[in-house]
Image: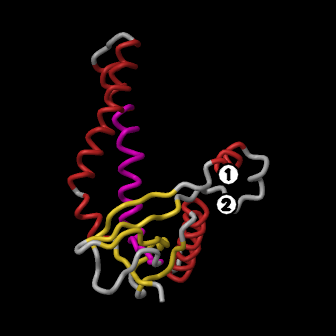
Amino acid sequence: MTETTSTLADQLLEAHVRHELNALKGAKLKKFSGIATVIRELAEVIAVESDSLLVSTELKTGCNGCAQQNTCGAGIISKAFSDRRAEFRIHRPKGQFTPGQQVELLLPEQALTRYSLMVYLLPILALLLIAIATGQLLSWPEGWVILSAFSGFAFSFYLLRRWLQQRDIQVAQLLSVQQID
């Protein structure tokens, strides 16, 4: 395979992944300074404090652009809960901010992908590995295998939550804020 074909394939794959993330997350993906792809999200400033901003974002579903949203169960449910908002504190960057002002939050796509994989993949791996270890290696009865696998699944969520809470400062450092003029 030539380098040109490989580059074209990489570009097509990147465009496809970008399209799928747009459809799933509802966020806009753009090249940031030509270096890395970031996810942009609009937020409204709720309160301004000396070292932080309280911002609110609208929680989006993946059902906004589908042609079947009026007949699909997930689309109907997403309409029932369409006015959902999330509020959180972020480090206050330099500049003047006022309540009600719109800002843009920027998060590197790579960080979101890494943390998403951890949250989705690690508990499933824990469930499968514990089920294999207790069922095949230890020859436990089926009921105990199921109970231990689901216990490990739940415990992995607990460990992930604790680990991610300790690294909250790191995530806050990845998030940047831009004022919208």
Mark 2 surroundings within 10 Å by alpha-carbon count, few (fewer than 14), some (14 through 19), many (20 or more): some
**Residue 73 coordinates in the image, percent (x, y):** 71, 42
Question: Residue drawn 52% across and 58% down?
Answer: 59
Question: Residue drawn 46% across and 71% down?
Answer: 44
Numbered label attached to residue 123: none
Q: Nearer the viewer, residue 129 or 114?
A: 114
Q: Nearer the viewer, residue 180 or 135?
A: 180
Q: Is residue 145 above or below residue 63?
A: above
**Residue 5 coordinates in the image, percent (x, y):** 56, 78
**Residue 125 coordinates in the image, percent (x, y):** 37, 38
Q: Secondary structure at mark 1?
A: helix
| Circle nearer the viewer, 2 or 1 | 1
Mark 1 surroundings within 10 Å by alpha-carbon count, few (fewer than 14), some (14 through 19), many (20 or more): some
Query: Which segment is the magenta one?
Result: 102-127
Question: Residue drawn 29% across and 45% down?
Answer: 161
Residue hosting label 1: 79
Magenta includes 113?
yes
Q: Nearer the viewer, residue 89 or 78?
A: 89
Q: Is residue 126 above or below residue 119?
A: above
Question: In the rendered structure, which disc, 2 or 1, sits on the residue that comes first in sequence?
Answer: 2
Location of residue 151 (image quadrant): top left
**Amino acid type, mark 2:** Asn
The residue furthest left is: 166
User: How many numbered markers are drawn?
Assistant: 2
Q: Is residue 67 above or below residue 44?
A: above
Q: Nearer the viewer, residue 117 or 11?
A: 117
Q: Secondary structure at mark 2?
A: loop
Q: CA distance from mark 2 to mark 1?
A: 9 Å
**Amino acid type, mark 1:** Lys
Numbered label attached to residue 64: 2
